[in-house]
Amino acid sequence: LGAILFQDSDYTRGLAVTTLALLLDPNLDAARLSFADAQTDLDHASDAQAMLDSVPAASAYHESARILMAWVLKSEGRDDAAIALASETAATGSPRAARALADLYRNTDHFAEAEPLYTALIAGDADDWRLFFSRAYIRDKLGRWPDAEADLQQALALSPDQPDVLNYLGYEWVDRGEHLEQGVAMIRRALQQRPRSAEIIDSLGWAYYRLGDYERALQYLEQAVELEPADATLNDHLGDLYWQIDRRTEARFQWRRALALTPSDAAALQAKL
C-alpha cells in the first residue's frame, strides 16, 4: 500500500503506512528501501541514509540498499563518494550493480567511463532497448553521432513505440537537418503517447522552427515553457524563435532567463545576447 501511495506522490500517508509495516515486521527490508526512496524524493537525505544503513549485509536487499545509497550521495552532490560506493558494489560481478555504476557515470558526465560498461551489459543482454538508448546518449556526448544513431535505431527495432527513443532520434535528425519529415513524424508519435511532456512538445516546436514554420513553432515552444519554466534549453529555444519573428525584447528576456538556469552552453547564450 505504501508503494502505491508513493507512486501517486502521497508521501504523508505512504510514509505512515510504511512505518506501520516496519513496526509490524522489523525485518521487512523491502519496506526500508521504499521508505528510503521516498525520503530521497523529499530531499531528506539523512533520513534515507539512516534507513539504508539499517539493512543488514545478510539481507537479500543489501545490494539494492547500497545502490540506492549511491544515488542518495549523488543527490547531495557527493559524486565521487557515490561512484566509489557503486564501484565497490559492482565489483561483485552483479549486472544490476554494474548497470547502476554505468548510470551514475552517465549522470555525472563521466561518459568515457560509462560506455564500456554499457557495451559489456549489452553483450550480456542484447534485447534491452534501454541499454542501447543509454549508450546512444553517451556516444552522442562523446561526439560519435553515427554510433549513437545506430544505437537509437537498434533501440527502436527492439521497442518501436518508445517515446524517449522516438523523441531523441527525431529531435537529433531535425536539429542536424537530416530526415526532416521522418524526424517530425517520430516526434509527433512520441507526443501522442506523452501529450504533457514539455521535452517532447519542445522538440516538436523546435522541429517546426527548423522547418521555418514559425507560427506552429510558436504554439509548441510557448506551451513547453509554460509546462517547464525552469528549463534552460526550452527558454533558449523560445528565445531563438522570438528573435526570428522580430520580438527582440522577449528574445533577450528568454536568453537571460536561460542563462540563469545553468545551461549546458552558457557561452553560446552570451554570444546571442
Image: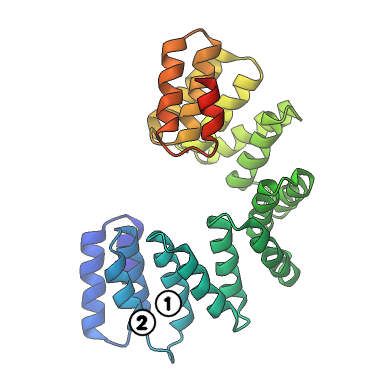
SS category of the residue bearing label 2: helix
The residue carrying mark 1 is 65
Residue shown at 39%/66% (left/top)? 72
Residue type marked 1: Ala
Q: Foreground residue, 224 or 255?
A: 255
The residue carrying mark 2 is 29
Around disc 1, counting alpha carbons within 10 Å, would you say few (fewer than 14), some (14 to 19), or many (20 or more)?
A: many
Q: Foreground residue, 238 or 112?
A: 112
Q: Position of residue 11 (x, y in %)?
A: 26, 60
Q: Going by the image, does 31 lie left or right of 157?
A: left
Q: Position of residue 41 (x, y in %)?
A: 34, 59
For the residues labelled 2 and 1, the Cα–Cα distance comes to 9 Å
Q: Position of residue 260 (x, y in %)?
A: 40, 33
Indicate which label's residue lies in the foreground, 2 or 1: 1
From the viewer's perspective, is residue 172 above or below residue 44?
Answer: above
Residue type marked 2: Asp
